[in-house]
Image (spheres, coloured by chain):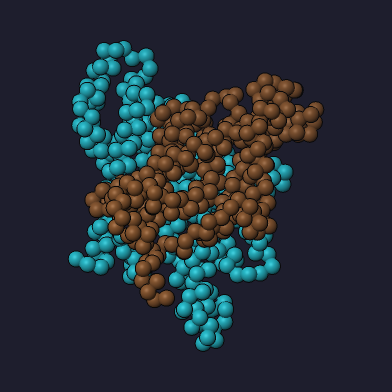
Chain colours: A cyan, B brown
Amino acid sequence: MSGLPKFLVQRLAAMVVILLVLTAIIFALQKISHANPVHGYLGANASKAAIAKESAILGYNKPVSDQYLHYVEGLFHGNLGRSLRTRRAVTTDLRAYLPATIELTVVALAEALVLGAALGLASVGRWRGSSALRVVMFSGASTPAFLLALLGVLILNGDLHWLPASGDTGVQNAPTGPTGIIVLDSLLHTDYATMWDGIVHLILPAFCVAIGPAVSIGRVLRGSLHSAMRSDFVRTARSKGLVERTILFRHAMRNSLSAALSMTGLQIGLMFAGVVVVETVFAWPGIGLYTDQSIPVADFPAIAGVTLVLGVFYVVINAVVDILQAVIDPRVTLE
Amino acid sequence: MAVAEAFVPSSPQRRGMAKVTSARKVFTGATKVDRFGLILLALLVVVAILAPLVAPYNPTVPSGLPFTPPLHGGHLMGTDEVGFDIFSRVLFGLRESLLGVVIVVTSGVVIGGLIGLVAGVAGGWLDAVLMRITDLFLALPAPLLAIAIAAALGPSFAHVLLAVAIVWWPFYARIMRGEVRALAARPHLEAAALAGAGPVRRGVRHLLPGAMPAIIVTASLDVGNLVVTLAGLSFLGLGAPAPAPELGAMSARGLQFLLQEWWVPVMPGIGVFLLALGANMSGDAIADATGLGA
């Protein structure tokens, strides 16, 4: 095997190993944390005998290696343990909270890409405002997501009453299902007023999540555009008389997208962390809010479930990004 | 010329050797924006170190009426729901942030640097094993793992630092290893090997000094990120319990007062912003001065 099929097999094998390591780390953390899952099932006042019996049933008296295998096997059946706080299966909780987070993350990612491309393109040229743009990018990279969210709520909701700042909809009996994403569900139910309400609720939180990754993507894009604009093929394009704009968009941009795409994949990890913080400020009913509520009561099974689900998303997305790049650009190989 | 070039193979990542530079040159060579950042950072560092001397009030003893607005009653940033002076608490919070950043960056440079150095000097199977482990860590979402690790260990400032340090080193290992491999092919290393220098001596005396500029630039560009990341974890309640003056936690606890007493949650956030801004601009100035910038 060589070329693309070989790359595909290697990259997917690497992905499986990474996922196994992720489960091993979370399993080990569960062991370190003082949250005994047996208490999760029986409650804090269970007798010692009942705990010993339940431990045996759940397999906590077996060797650690067996427990790990049991844990991974459980994962395949969607068993993420039981939340100590809500007393429900973590999988059930995640199913309720995940759609809102996916909605927020997808919109934020789209915003980050558009903003990042705009920042990268605008800062590569030399024009009057380009040093002001540098300050904007520095500020974007230096603002913690929670400060941005606080200021957004304060100014756009508190003073100006432009945008709502709490939850994903203000409508009382908004359609639920089949997706759990308000905007999509109301569209499917042709309830356009609710859909609009959902979109309006999305604007501010998504922007707060997007700004940090947008700056990182913009920086990488500027870097590669900068070197592309000094390359031989751009000199050739100039010497045959192409307009600067055509050179930038048709020639330099195409050759610079690869690095920006990799950066986007990596930034998704940062976006997940941003989502947790931003959902807290906006009371957005997603798994970030779920995490924030789980941390003060040391509900580790819930936190482990969130980490695992988002971690799997992250690892799979990055594998897909790598494979896409290999498909687009034949120079890409695994080192 | 062609002969000289044949002896100096350059790796694709390197944009050329680092220029040896001094603190003064970093400042005089910087753009106006970066100069502002250097001054801001220096000011914040001095104020943070001297916090016990310059803070007008004790950060954990009520010093006025609750919810005094900024610039009233001798409170520059107002007071919070207990009557703590927010300005004093922000100064102590900056101190905690800086301490945290220094600890995490140092551990990243030492652990990552050591692993990268050993991998780069040893080569062969040891290099392969160490770099596979490094790549594994790089492939996992660091901020999320830090949240999970800190949550598993229980809320405390030390646990947050430990959690971030665990996910922070792989990046430094990659940079160090890349630098070492690039340097290893240079003539002075060949000369050192011919003179009988063993791997340890070559690593410590000949390779490490050459790789340090890139590591220092990486670290200085990293500080701003780290300030924001640590504040985020603290915001989620993973740091020290109240009433410890931690910037992220102060903001989170003040969240409920946002629409009436906005200064309670916003002021600590501005502290984080200024520190990160100063660090990011300074990092940029240092990267430019050494010629290793993007």
Which residue is rendered at x = 37% and y = 24% of the image? A34
The spot of residue B114 in percent (x, y) is 37, 44
Which residue is rendered at x = 50% and y = 81% of the image? A235
Q: Is residue B34 left or right of residue A194?
A: right
| A11, B191: nearer the viewer | B191
Q: Is residue B282 left or right of residue B4?
A: right
| B52, A310: nearer the viewer | B52
**Quadrant location of the C terminus of chain A in the rendered image:** bottom left
Q: Quick check: B20 above or below B264? A: below
Residue A224 visible? The answer is yes
| B243, A108: nearer the viewer | B243
The spot of residue A94 in percent (x, y) is 40, 38
The spot of residue A241 in percent (x, y) is 55, 86
**Quadrant location of the N terminus of chain A in the rendered image:** bottom left
Q: Residue furthest front?
A: B195
Q: Residue furthest bottom?
A: A240
Which residue is rendered at x = 67% and y = 36% of the image? B47
Q: Quick check: A318 above or below B274? A: below
Q: Residue furthest right?
A: B73
Q: Quadrant of residue B250?
A: top right
| B224, A58: nearer the viewer | B224
Residue A95 visible? The answer is no
Q: Quadrant of residue A164?
A: top right
Q: Is residue A212 left or right of residue A14?
A: right
Total marks placed: 0
Which residue is rendered at x = 75% and y = 23% of the image? B65
The spot of residue B228 in percent (x, y) is 55, 43
